[in-house]
Amino acid sequence: MEQGVNLTLKNLSLKNGKAPAANADGGGIYCENAYLTMENVTVENCTAMRFGGGIYYRVSPGVQKKKGITLTGCTLKGNSAEVSGGGLCVSCEQNASISGSVMENCTVEENKVTGPVPPVYTSCGGGVYIGSYTETTFEIKNCSITENLCDHLNATGAGLAVHCNTSSPAVPAPTLILSGTNTIDDNKTIASLGKGRGIHLHNSMLILNNTSLNLCNPLSPLSSPGSAKQDIYLKGSKERILLRGNLTVTEVDGRTPYNEITLTPEIYTDGRTVLTGAVTAGSPQNYTKFLVPDDTSLQQWSIHPDGTLQSP
């Protein structure tokens, strides 16, 4: 699809698509610089050798977009990519920007990234991958992201991965917004090297917008020893979680209740800010709904009411 084109897909199924070439992207759908709207569409069992097993959405260098991709009532299931975005990959290139992308009332399940051979890339986002060199916003509302897999030793973000592809402090961070009620459950990596079984953030921001989260993202039985649950992983030192309104955390499917979000920073530093915004809102207060384990020292860190890390 070309720049400026509007495409709307409704009430259909796309199955068994393939992008088999070595650098091919978008096994089910490839869309570049267009406005893509999907309603009640199923993308299933599609594969890509690089990015976006189910859907690959790209904004090319220099293109500025106020609206990108909108998915409503869609299902992305059983898709796979070698590098990033088993179900969906959104890529915003250098000097480009995109805002207004939304995924609402959707199901993203049983997708995976398998890892390239040889491993020239780090695989990311078994379910959804959002990668950007510049400011990008993507909202997920009332969605289920479950049973996605990073099937590679160094793969990260089994459920969701949000990465800024430059470490320049002058570049605005890409932002993932979670609103409504979202289930991010039973997403897995196969090794302890694979970080962020629920959400992996790299030089990016997560906004929890008055949301209710159902979270339980354990290690796979195939994994090396490590934390039993890892919902959000902060790669590096720039990542932040912005809280708006009240945060509700609930158990999933009646299993052993986890009423906290497990937050795992790569860098443990006393006084590092990890939460901003409505940190003390709610009852109990929002900051008390996070656990901060340290697998290396086997100690439990905590979060201060000002949103900063505190050592044991």
Image (cartoon, rainbow, N blue to C red):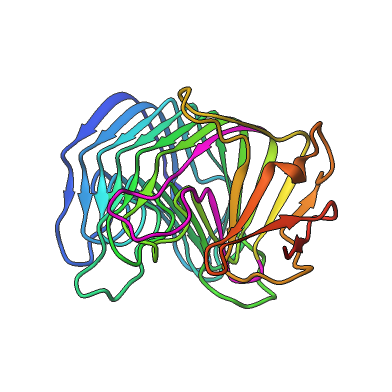
Residue 162 lies in magenta, yes or no? no
User: Does the image show residue 198?
Assistant: yes
Q: Foreground residue, 75 or 146?
A: 146
Q: Is residue 69 above or below residue 91?
A: above
Residue drawn at 50 percent across, 51 percent down? 230
Q: Is residue 53 left or right of residue 269?
A: left
Position of the C terminus, as image quadrant, is bottom right
Q: Is residue 37 left or right of residue 1?
A: right
Residue drawn at 79 percent across, 68 percent down? 271
* Type of secondary structure dominating the magenta stretch: loop
Residue drawn at 26 percent across, 74 percent down? 119
Q: Foreground residue, 295 or 149?
A: 295
Q: Is residue 220 left or right of residue 140?
A: left
Q: Foreground residue, 79 or 172?
A: 79
Q: Position of residue 207 (x, y in %)?
A: 67, 47
Q: Is residue 139 above or below residue 93?
A: above
Q: Position of residue 174 (x, y in %)?
A: 60, 59
Q: Is residue 85 above or below residue 280?
A: below
Residue 233 lies in magenta, yes or no? yes
Q: Quadrant of residue 301?
A: bottom right
User: Does the image show residue 1?
Assistant: no
Q: Is residue 29 left or right of residue 124?
A: left
Residue drawn at 45 percent across, 44 percent down? 217
Q: Is residue 41 above or below residue 191?
A: above
Q: Position of residue 51 (x, y in %)?
A: 31, 58
Q: Position of residue 306 (x, y in %)?
A: 85, 55
Q: Quadrant of residue 48?
A: bottom left
Looking at the rendering, the stretch of residues picked out in magenta corresponds to 211-238
